């Protein structure tokens, strides 16, 4: 994983829960906020991972020719 991708992933994984907690900590429990952050982050992280996997696969395919 490149350093940019790692930085982007860490920012996504920390900003979303922090923002959710700051906005709704008075009305919702921390566990509910954590679950919401996981549900929001999961598809984004999977999408980033799938893109990385595809790039590495294409790179391997083109280098074998």
Image: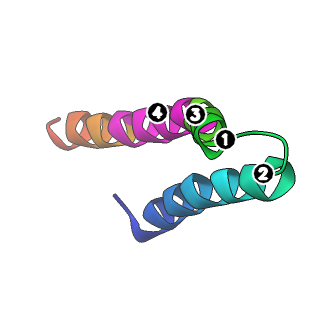
Say how many tags the image has: 4
**Are dots 4 and 2 in contact, CB under 8 Å?**
no
Estimate the spatial distance between the alpha carbons at disc 3 and disc 4, rounded to whole Å. Answer: 17 Å
Residue holding disc 1: 33
Classify residue 22 by image quadrant. bottom right
**Are dots 2 and 1 in contact, CB under 8 Å?**
yes
Estimate the spatial distance between the alpha carbons at disc 4 and disc 2, rounded to whole Å. Answer: 27 Å
Q: Please name which of the two marks, 3 or 2, marks the residue nearer to the observer.
A: 2
Which segment did they paint magenta? 40-54
Please report the residue visible at 41 percent of the width from the left and 39 percent of the height from the top. Answer: 49
Estimate the spatial distance between the alpha carbons at disc 3 and disc 2, rounded to whole Å. Answer: 13 Å
Residue holding disc 2: 25
Estimate the spatial distance between the alpha carbons at disc 1 and disc 4, rounded to whole Å. Answer: 20 Å
Q: Neighbour class for label 1 at 10 Å: few (<14), some, many (≥20)?
A: many
- Pick the residue in front: 21 or 10: 21
- Pick the residue in front: 34 or 11: 34
**Are dots 1 and 3 in contact, CB under 8 Å?**
yes
Labels 3 and 2: the sequence-earlier one: 2
Estimate the spatial distance between the alpha carbons at disc 1 and disc 3, rounded to whole Å. Answer: 5 Å
Residue holding disc 3: 35
Q: Residue furthest left?
A: 64
């Amino acid at each position: 994983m490149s350093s940019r991708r790692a930085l982007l992933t860490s920012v996504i994984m920390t900003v979303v829960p922090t923002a959710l907690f700051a906005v709704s900590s008075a009305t919702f429990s921390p566990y509910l906020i954590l679950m919401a952050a996981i549900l929001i982050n999961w598809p984004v992280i999977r999408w980033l991972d799938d893109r990385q996997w595809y790039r590495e696969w294409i790179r391997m395919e083109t280098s074998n020719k």
